[in-house]
Amino acid sequence: MTEMSDNMLQIKNYKKSYGDKVAVDGIYLDVEPGEIFGFIGHNGAGKTTTIKGVVGILDFDEGEILINGKSIITDAIACKKEMAYIPDNSEFYEVLTGIKYINFISDIYEVSKEKRNELIKKYSDIFEMTDNLGDTISSYSRGMKQKLAVIAALVHEPKLLVLDEPFVGLDPKATHSLKMIMHEICDKGGSIFFSTHVLEVAEKLCDHIAIIKEGKIVATGTTEEVMGKKSLEEVFLELIDHD
Amino acid sequence: MTKTLMLIKIELLNLFGNNNFARKKSGKKAISVFTFIAPAGVMLYISVLYSFLLMDSLPVGSQYIMPVLMTILSFIVLISLSFYNATGHLFGFKDFDLLMSLPISKISVMVSKLVAFLLMDYFFALFLVMPYIIVYGIKMAQPFLYYLFGIIAFVFLPLIPMAIASILALVINSVTGNFRYKALLRNILTLLMVGIIMFGSMQMQNLLLMDMTSAAALMNNIKIYAIPIYYFIQALINLDVWSLILFILISTVVFVLFLLLFTKMFTKVNIKLNKGYKVKNFHLKSEGSSTRLVAMFKLQVKRYFGSTVYLVNTIVGPLMLIVFIIIGLFSGVDEIKLYLSAFDQNGMLMPLLTVAILFISSMCVITACSISLEGKNIDMLKSFPIPISEIFIAKILVQVIMNGLICILTIILGFLIYDISLSNALILIIVSIIGSVLYAVFGLVINLLFPKMNWDSETIPVKQSMSVIVAMFGGMIFTGLQAYGYILLTNSLSFIAYLSLMMLFDILLITGMWSYLTTFGARKFKRL
């Protein structure tokens, strides 16, 4: 029986192995409504494996992941409807145009015609992509693909936005816009769970932070609690270098 | 030079998909080897079988017709293979930007692509050409010099087919590069090209058959229509050194001319192909909405028509049905009606048409690589709030609609033009619908069992993956077994009774495979 909770995302004892190699070793995390949660770790620490488990791409060996109180294992479709995922390497159906892709995502998430038209206009203007939506995705630069992924993720108004390295490839203006939108989602009661290597961004943007090392959480708490009187970079390097 | 060799090595590993062969488990190693060997095995089988059959059926003194026919066949097969593979390997390959950004000369990149491509042609040619050269040598007790000539000529044989096919691919890619609907235009041009190659090969065989009795006329036709083949044959049969030299010269000149064109156009065409289409003055309009399943289906249709190699590989078979009907219009409807009526009186018309419909359906397994073709998109697909069963249905629908519609259209044309009775037409329509669903579901099951998610060119999952080979041969064998069952039971069961039993059996199979897909299959899909 799943325990009801107010948290937008709950990860309980999540464990995932690839063959003999343990990628994530029984981690616990909670993301509350209105919170921006930064997930930090070095390459291969288990960030993407955790994120893929959260969004229902990966099966896992042990544990439980709840999205707004629903299990991603037993109630996957309902969970997925409430969240949006932006992967670190935005892969697309390159034969489609930008607008066709967003429209496809809107259909999959069952967004009404009125709502999708309003939100496509809003976000494509913010990210200065309106003029490019008629082009095929194969003609897009990496940054434009990332912007398209963000617009497509926002068009169904997710309660939980899960992002894997979202700022990679974005220009400074788009990065700023995305940060503003992340705050806007949280102000409306939504939550953000994202991984990043850019510690300055995490330090300024996040309410909560968790640091993962070799599949285990080595530090978690509010940004102030994790940092203490040091910078996030100092804390991170100390934890990562410490055996 | 070292860099070029390193690039060639990487190209070959990519081409044959064995870059982590040493680390694969024994089962997967076996699959890799089979995927690699199966097409070569088919060619070897065709070559040996045809060589022996022809040698045994030709009268004494005319045995040289066997290498003539086999060389023509080899040219056609090599042109078709190279033509299919050129887009993806020589043009429009995914690592173009990466390779051009490396501190390697443009020539090294071109050479590596070309050498790997040529080696692939040699690999298939080895299984296609060498067997008939050996068979002829043994049967005709040829001296050692014959085999020496054979080996030398073999080295130059794939150059012309490869050059012709690559130039055709180059023309198509350079013409379509700037169009908005470039995929559509490329599909149409490619289908036209396939049609021309097939028509040309039929014409060539007609010419040969017409003059089968006259050795001089036969070689004359070859000399007019296919000079390189003429010299190749002269060199081999008569051990004529000058013919060998002329064959080498012609092959080399054609290949060098191709190289000059290729060098000039390589970067230009690939930049054009990698650019994608940009629209001027785009304005947002009100967007319509669809249900999840329709949206997924539309995506699959776009995917299907967006990939020429995918489309051509699966649509040529069913389209041939319509082509035959149309050819019949010009070559005498009344004559065909007489044949059909004779078959009908023997009770063989419906069994034959049923087998033809099922056989064509089994050759058009669009679903056999539809999961593999998701490639790196698979993670996004899995993150969508849509049941996996709906993704499967969307993929199955593409095949059922494409294959089913073509079959139904053919049956309607047969009904209108060739007086196939209404009841027979209706039965054939039911058969084609059940057959389409059966092989679509079967293809999906096989693709889940043998997925190939990492690839650089769509040609690899579409033409060189285990799932496509197993689905196609599995389907053809199953159709053959159903036909064989009828032959065995023909005295105890009427055709309609047998067909009803078979269709019931097929529906049970579909149900069984669907329940596999929605349980184990869905779990396997999640683990991809």
Image (spheres, coloured by chain):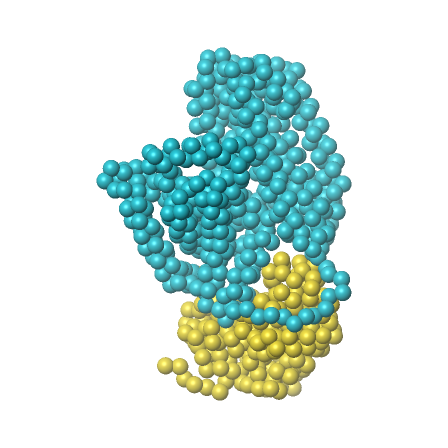
Chain colours: A yellow, B cyan
* Towards the viewer: B213 or A17: B213
In percent of the image, x 69 and y 62: which residue is there? A135
Q: How many marks?
A: 0
Q: Residue furthest left?
A: B492
Residue B350 spot, x, y in % from top left: 37, 41
Residue A42 spot, x, y in % from top left: 59, 69
* Residue B171 visible, this orientation: yes
In percent of the image, x 63 and y 24: which residue is there? B226
* Towards the viewer: B210 or B305: B210
* Residue B116 visible, this orientation: no
Q: Is residue A200 left or right of residue A3?
A: right
Above-or-below relation of B479 to B140 = below
In percent of the image, x 62 and y 39: which residue is there? B193
* Towards the viewer: B327 or B501: B327
Residue B39 spot, x, y in % from top left: 49, 39
* Towards the viewer: A139 or A195: A139
Above-or-below relation of B159 to A65 = above
Above-or-below relation of A159 to A15 = below
Residue B526 spot, x, y in % from top left: 46, 64
Q: Is residue B254 left or right of residue B220?
A: right
Q: Is residue B494 left or right of residue A106?
A: left
Quarter of the figure with the N terminus of chain B: top right
* Rendered image quadrant of residue B157: top right
Q: Residue furthest top?
A: B61
In percent of the image, x 64 and y 84: which residue is there? A184
Q: Is residue B252 left or right of residue A192?
A: right
